[in-house]
Image (spheres, rainbow, N blue to C red):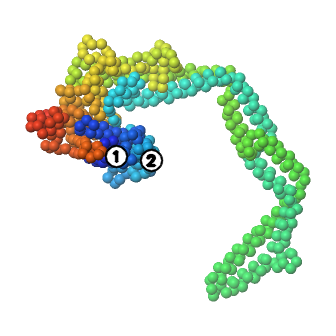
Amino acid sequence: MLDEIRITGLGVISDATLPLGAGLTVITGETGAGKTMVVTSLGLLFGGRADGGRVRADTGRAVVEGRLRLAGAAAPVVQARVEEAGGEIDDDGTVLLSRTVTAEGRSRAHVGGRAVPAGVLAEVGAAVVAVHGQSDQLRLLRASEQRGALDRFAGSAHEKLLGEYGERFAQWRAVDEDLANRRRTARERHQEADLLKLGLDEITRVDPQPGEDELLKAEAQRLEHVEGLRTAAQLAYQVLGGSVDDTPDVNGMLSTAQRTLEAQAELDAVLGEQAGRLAEAATVISDVALDLNRYLDALDADPARLQEVYERRSALRSLTRKYAEDIDGVLAWAAHAQARLGELDTSDEVLEELDRERRRLAGDTAELAAKLSASRREASARFSDAVTEELTGLAMPHARVEVAIGQRPVGGGPTLTVAGAEVGVGPDGADEVELRLLAHPGAPSLALQKGASGGELSRVMLAIEVVFAGAGGPPTLVFDEVDAGVGGRAAVEIGRRLARLARDHQVFVVTHLPQVAAFADRHLVVAKDTGGAVTTSGVRLVEDTERARELARMLAGLPDSDLGIAHAEELLAVAAKEKRR
């Protein structure tokens, strides 16, 4: 969970520190005070898009810093990602995150003291926080998002089935496209295959060996300069053996020096060590002389062999001119060409084999699509019952949410026969999912965006989020004015639901409803200061009587009204009683 956030230079917030903790934290304040900037700062801290337009002109940059405490199921995932990025986790089990955005829109991110791409913050955020706002409500109105939401709710077994289906679907599409491409480009493939075969035949006739060109180059140099090499080796051999006029015997000189030093070794060990080194030198010289003698025996002018080397190098050069810079490259070209021939094969046998594989994968994909549909229908019933139960507690006792699962229509994409019917299929199956609302008994079942008013939509979305949270997900939840358009008893129920979520999650709520704020474990107020030339806002923690005054302001705009404060205290008492249940 988040222990603390500091915001500097973002929107109307000049510099504010938010003390955070477990449970339900509400954030309130006058309209325009900057409540939404708190949610914006969380988005930046966890890898959201950097918008230079939100940076205060007087600072030129915005900085959001947060201390994240690693705990629960998400801790191993976050710890592994932080360590992979080179960041450090503090001894108390927390990690520091920061994001800096300039007025020009440039962005920098840090995790555990190490500069990282913003994508690392996004990966950490995906594991620990989920932000829900009015924009998220609009997102959930899209059919693809509703299908994804149902899949997430369905559980791990469904998720495994979805992964298996996606893998098989990708295999089927790859084979299908390969087969179609081979049939469509048969002529071009035949031409390319013929050219590759010509090259392979030429390389096979020459039969080059790895590194052969360099070996032959060295051998040619020896044969071309054999007399000079013989003269140098013979002279060196004779000098080492003392057989050259006026040249002393090297081994004899070393032997004399060795004996002289050994005679005095008992008096000084240093001389004994030097005598040993002279003995080693004599051995090395003897070995060199022996090797030179062998070299001379093997060295022989062979014009016929030199001609063979010339001819072989010419044959190899004909290959390197066409296929690669050296023989190793030629061999690599041949290996690639051989593999490419397999890809280009358009023989009837290959096409028939690919067609059999395509049909087999299509059958497997269709079977998995049918299982996926059945799993979604089972999950949809559970999802519908759970959301409907939540709606009862949100002052919509007669409403019901249903999940309509239909077949994807044919047209514009691949199709399969699933459960006896031809349907369109995609990477996520053959289903179209739509959330529908029955506002009251006898009312028609309508898509959410058509069947719900603004206040009803907020409650439906909150009910969905409550159900999602119960099915797992990130440990920190952020709600940005999801209670818009709601009031009265429904507002109290929203507060109760959020408080219930906060028993197992860290929950942040930006709200304008005192009924919701009354359920908070921690109440932060964003206050605007217009006394200077530039409007700024700060964030403060309110407790006790200050909290009642803030609720009175939210109730009637009269923070000092005795009646308003009394009403606020009553709200706080009701909320405290409800939370103890």
Please identify the quarter of the rendering in which residue 297 is found: bottom right
Could you tell me how far apart the alpha carbons at marks 1 and 2 are, in whole angstroms?
22 Å
**Residue 527 horizontal/vertical position (percent):** 24, 42
For label 2, the crowd category at 10 Å Cα-Cα, with few meaning under 14, some 14 to 19 and many 20 or more, is: some
Label 2 sits on a secondary structure element that is strand
- Between 136 and 224, the residue placed more toward the observer is 136
Q: Nearer the viewer, mark 1 or mark 2?
A: 1
For badge 2, the amino acid type reads: Val
Judging by the rendered image, the residue that carries numbered circle 2 is 116
Give the vertical position of 404 relative to 478 (above or below). Answer: above
The residue drawn where x is 71% and y is 39% is: 333
Q: Earlier in the sequence, mark 1 or mark 2?
A: 1
For label 1, the crowd category at 10 Å Cα-Cα, with few meaning under 14, some 14 to 19 and many 20 or more, is: many
Left or right: 146 in relation to 356: left
Let me know if residue 504 appears in the view: no
Q: Quadrant of the C terminus?
A: top left
Left or right: 437 in relation to 200: left
The residue drawn where x is 32% and y is 33% is: 132
Judging by the rendered image, the residue that carries numbered circle 1 is 9
The residue drawn where x is 55% and y is 25% is: 173
For badge 1, the amino acid type reads: Gly
Please identify the quarter of the rendering in which residue 195 is found: top right
Q: Quadrant of the N terminus?
A: top left
